[in-house]
């Protein structure tokens, strides 16, 4: 599959194990995994960062194989999910940093073009999240108020 705003056609990605059950050597319970997830979310970590920490520090390869539900669903059940989706949050963060760069370097035309591409991705993703009701229907991205969203 091709990229949206570049000419790359990379197909590489991580391969999940065939077995969907938890490994036999893992001696951690569902409750302990959920407790770890909630503890890390209260520290302000995103669901993907929580998954990386659980994988690297606690040896939990796939949270869904142990608990039966993904990290974000666990956090939603506990009321700790982020208010805007993670991918949209990172696009907004990138747009804010590019805009800050453009304030210092006004003649950087390439960054101005890249900002247009990033913001078009934000609008496209926001439109999708409105249709699947992950964002309220009156939510709108504005560059003036974007820095408060990611602060």
Image (cartoon, helix red, strand yellow):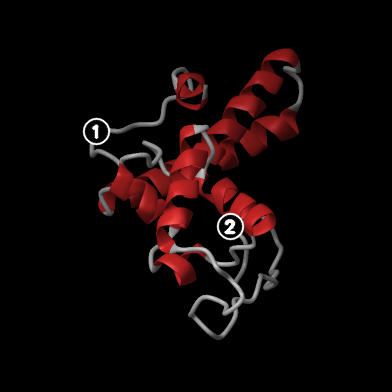
Label 2: few (<14), some (14–19) or many (≥20) C-alpha neighbours in 10 Å: few
State the mark number for residue 138: 1
Judged from the image, the secondary structure of the residue bearing numbered disc 2 is loop
73 relative to 146 in the view: left or right: left
Q: In the rendered image of this protein, does residue 100 appear above or below residue 5?
A: above
State the mark number for residue 4: 2
Residue 5 in sight here: no
Which residue appears at 44% of the width and 48% of the height? Answer: 35
117 relative to 80 in the view: left or right: right
97 relative to 127 in the view: left or right: right
54 relative to 134 in the view: left or right: right
Which residue appears at 69% of the width and 21% of the height? Answer: 102
Rendered location of residue 66, percent (x, y): 47, 68
Quadrant location, the N terminus: bottom right
Residue 117 in sight here: yes
Name the front one of labels 1 and 2. Answer: 1
Judged from the image, the secondary structure of the residue bearing numbered disc 1 is loop
Q: CA distance from mark 1 to mark 2?
A: 26 Å
Which residue appears at 62% of the width and 61% of the height? Answer: 3
Q: In the rendered image of this protein, does residue 4 appear above or below residue 92?
A: below
Q: In the rendered image of this protein, does residue 48 appear above or below residue 135?
A: below
């Amino acid at each position: 599959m091709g990229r949206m705003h570049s000419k790359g056609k990379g197909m590489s990605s991580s391969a999940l194990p065939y077995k969907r059950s938890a490994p036999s050597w893992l001696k951690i319970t569902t409750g302990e995994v959920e407790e770890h997830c909630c503890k890390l979310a209260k520290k302000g970590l995103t669901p993907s960062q929580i998954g990386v920490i659980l994988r690297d520090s606690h040896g939990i390869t796939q949270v869904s194989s142990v608990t039966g539900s993904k990290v974000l669903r666990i956090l939603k059940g506990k009321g700790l999910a982020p208010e805007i989706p993670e991918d949209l949050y990172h696009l907004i963060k990138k747009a804010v940093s590019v805009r800050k760069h453009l304030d210092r370097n006004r003649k950087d035309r390439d960054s101005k073009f890249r900002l247009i591409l990033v913001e078009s991705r934000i609008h496209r993703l926001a439109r999708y999240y409105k249709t699947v009701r992950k964002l309220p229907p009156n939510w709108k991205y504005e560059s003036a108020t974007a820095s408060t969203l990611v602060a």
